[in-house]
Image (cartoon, rainbow, N blue to C red):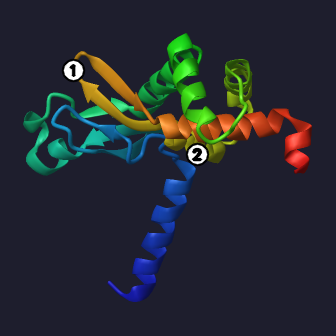
Amino acid sequence: MDSFDRRQRGMRAARTRAETPALLKGLIFGPAGKAMTPTHTRRRGRLYRYYVSTTALKQGSEACPIRRVPAAEVESTVIDQIRQLLNTPEIIVRTWRAVRQTADGITEHEVRQAVERLDPLWDELFPAEQARIVRLLVERVDIQPDGASIRLRVEGLTSLVGDLRAAGNPAQRAA
């Protein structure tokens, strides 16, 4: 295979990756604690995206109870969970306590307002911005046969609250 063919194949692969975003890339892990990798297939002109267990890829499908999960389904579940978690009093208070350390004088009410601004904006965000926020908020997603668990980053919440607070306060944006 000459270098032109390799370059063409590399360009096709890069274009495909750009067309098939993987919101949880690097964040999603299978039952054995090993990473799951994004992949896709096309059937009859339709794109189907998945996260595939690297354990199953390397050791065969029998080695992992969850070989693959539909990307849209797991991404939607994670986003729904983030939205629900962000509105719980415990997360608001934990975030406020963390934000207070760096933003003197911020109130719990301001943190709540900043977090509440995210939910209605989510669907209007570009996929790249959604991915940035997910990476900011999510430390890890573990997939098990009986469901998924999501570990959030408190420092990511702190950063996001700062961004949202600035976006909602014209005086702070001008500064």
Q: Give the residue displayed 44% in from the left and 71% down from the top.
A: 10
Q: Is residue 15 visible?
A: yes
Residue type beneath disc 1: Pro
Of pointers 2 and 1, the one earlier in the residue sequence: 2
Residue 40 location, x and y as percent? 40, 44
Q: Give the residue displayed 21% in from the left and 29% down from the top.
A: 66
Residue 136 location, x and y as percent? 53, 42
Q: Is residue 45 visible?
A: no
Residue 24 location, x and y as percent? 44, 40
Q: Give the residue displayed 91% in from the left and 49% down from the top.
A: 174
Secondary element under disc 1, as helix, strand or loop, is loop
Where is mark 2, residue-wise?
A: 132
Where is mark 1, residue-wise?
A: 145
CA neighbours of label 1 inside 10 A, class few (<14), some (14 to 19), many (20+): few
Front residue (pair 6, 160): 160
Q: Give the residue displayed 9% in from the left and 47% down from the top.
A: 59
Residue 113 location, x and y as percent? 74, 21
Residue type beneath disc 2: Arg
Q: Quadrant of residue 140?
A: top left
CB atoms of marks 2 and 1 within 8 Å: no
